[in-house]
Image (tube, rainbow, N blue to C red):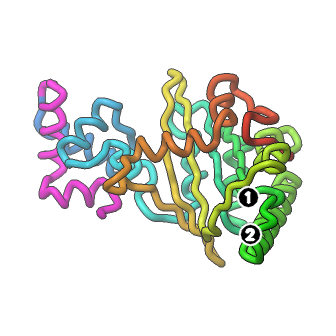
Amino acid sequence: MPETLADLRNAKGLTQEELGRLVALRLGLQYVPGSGQKRISRFERNEAEPSVEELRAIGMELGVDQQIIFLSIKSGGIGEARSVFEKVGVDQTVRSIMAVCCLSKSRARSLDDSFASMKEAIEQRNLTMCVFIPYPTSLQLPEYGEHADTLASYYRKVRKSVSEANLLFKSRISADYSHRVALYIPRTDLVRSSIILLPPIARQYSLMVEESSSGALTKTLLEWTPSTERDISRPLLATGVLSIDEQIEGWEAFFGDVLADWIAAKELPGKDAYWERVR
């Protein structure tokens, strides 16, 4: 699958000028020769973001989901994860939240470049970070045997490493902004009577919600792969079964009222029907 807008355009055999003209015609705009090339060129260099109508029109001309068009412009495809934080708060964005589902252990020490990018986005560009550990604190499955013990041991390792990383990170940012970093786990009163077994997955997923000065929300779904020297981010694509919008809807439902309350009330809740904030 092509990764950038230029790749998507070239795959269709279109020049910047041709795509710009087709988009203008689809939108019913009077076309001025040369204007289309300049507009598409700015999108491809990430110097400007298309409007919702332009995104839809570009997607229709290239035959792909409009969310993929947005991601190809916003992230430039596969790259270092810190670049995601460096782009927070650009253009007309007034506040952002990144909800991260941690399915694997955190590294022993943070990467300096990634940490600096996250710290700057939180302290200077109004980013809120909330991390979710989906693994329960206990397993009430006495009949399940050593398989449950294996999973429980992995769950403990993930919780411990993520919790320690969270404490370290919060200790290194200004106290005035520590409320913008939150850690959530499944509510303890729920896991006493029920349990959901989740497989260990050595990557994590994040949903970024950005609010513009007009109140419009932009949602970006990324897959993160931690490595020893750098973290890699990759925009999630349509699967052939699920569209990007359906995947975003699923992750929004997973994060529950934590994300919904931030969008509506501009603050993170202490708990909802499933999650509770531990710090």
Numbered range of the magenta stretch: 1-30
Residue 175 image-quadrant placement = top right
Residue that carries the numbered disc 2 in the rendered image: 144
Residue that carries the numbered disc 1 in the rendered image: 135
- Magenta segment includes 157: no
- Report the residue at 73% width, 69% height from top: 105
**Depicted 36 relative to depicted 149: above or below:** above
Residue 93 image-quadrant placement = top right
Task: State whether the magenta stretch is mostly helix, strand or loop.
Answer: helix
**Depicted 92 relative to depicted 2: above or below:** above
SS category of the residue bearing label 2: loop
Q: Is residue 146 visible?
A: yes
- Magenta segment includes 21: yes
Residue 198 image-quadrant placement = bottom right
Question: What residue type is disc 1 on?
Answer: Tyr
Indicate which disc, 2 or 1, sits on the residue closer to the N terminus.
Answer: 1
Left or right position of 52 against 122: left
- Across and down, in percent, residue 257 comes to 67, 33
- Report the residue at 68% width, 55% height from top: 196
Q: Nearer the viewer, residue 107 or 144?
A: 144
